[in-house]
Image (cartoon, grey):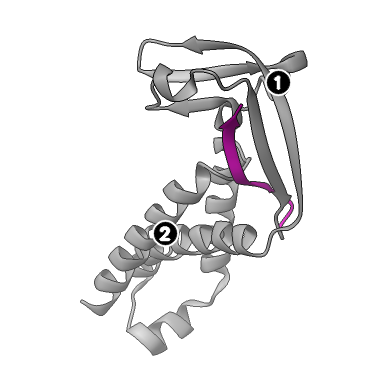
């Protein structure tokens, strides 16, 4: 029962950390999946005898524990450390050329020279109204270099 509790706890903590930090880390889903799989493989490199000594696992319980518990937890901690130990913040102000909406109440901005056109985490503003954007013609963006090389959005505001 202990391993199931630890695995589920690791799963939920890891998923919540990943969901929260994925939105502010400039990383695509494919790279995040590779990191998740990498941590699962690292968990498999620990010999079964150590799992049996600590938790009295059999082989299948070790597989479940690594996939459900270890991989999401360490991926979430990886993104957390990348965010917390970010350095070299750079603040830049970009002119907003136009606004756009799609069908799911997702508003985005087009910046000068189509800067960050392929990064919806920077130019997209979900659940924002036109009233909150009215009269604001610039996007002030602070991006920092994370410890593991992934850039992190520290601040993103619309200004006049």
Residue 144: horizontal and vertical position, in percent?
71, 50
Q: Which element is circle 1 on?
A: strand
> Marks 2 and 1: CB-CB under 8 Å?
no
* Left or right: 89 as drawn, with respect to 97: right
* Left or right: 116 as drawn, with respect to 74: right
Predominant SS of the magenta segment: strand
Q: Quadrant of residue 114?
A: top right
Residue 82: horizontal and vertical position, in percent?
64, 59
- Residue under pointer 1: 95
Residue farthest along the left direction in this orientation? 1
Q: Quadrant of residue 120?
A: top right
Q: Is residue 74 visible?
A: yes
**Mark 1 or mark 2, which is nearer the start of the sequence?**
2
Q: Disc number at residue 14?
A: 2
Q: Is residue 41 visible?
A: no
Identify the residue shown where x is 67% and y is 64%. 85
Q: Residues within 10 Å of mark 2 (few under 14, many from 20)?
A: many
Residue 97: horizontal and vertical position, in percent?
66, 12
Q: CA distance from mark 2 to mark 1?
A: 37 Å
Which is in the foreground here, disc 2 or disc 1? 1
> Range of the magenta residues?
148-160
Q: Does residue 54 lie above or below 74 as drawn?
A: below
Identify the residue shown where x is 34% and y is 74%. 58
Residue 26: horizontal and vertical position, in percent?
63, 40
* Residue 86 forms part of the magenta stretch: no
Identify the residue shown where x is 45% and y is 11%. 101
Q: Residues within 10 Å of mark 1 (few under 14, many from 20)?
A: some
């Amino acid at each position: 029962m202990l391993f199931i509790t630890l695995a589920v706890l690791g799963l939920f903590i890891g998923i919540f950390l990943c969901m929260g930090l994925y939105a502010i880390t400039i990383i695509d889903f494919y790279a995040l999946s590779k990191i998740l799989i990498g941590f699962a493989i690292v968990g498999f490199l620990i010999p079964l005898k150590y799992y049996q000594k600590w938790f009295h696992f059999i082989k299948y319980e070790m597989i479940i524990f690594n996939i459900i518990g270890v991989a999401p937890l360490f991926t979430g901690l990886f993104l957390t450390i990348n965010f917390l130990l970010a350095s070299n913040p750079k603040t830049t102000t970009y002119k907003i050329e136009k606004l756009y909406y799609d069908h799911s109440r997702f508003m985005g901005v087009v910046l000068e020279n189509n800067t960050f056109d392929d990064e919806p985490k920077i130019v997209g503003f979900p659940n924002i109204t036109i009233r909150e954007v009215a009269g604001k013609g610039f996007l002030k963006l602070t991006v920092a270099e994370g410890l593991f090389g992934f850039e992190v959005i520290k601040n993103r505001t619309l200004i006049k």
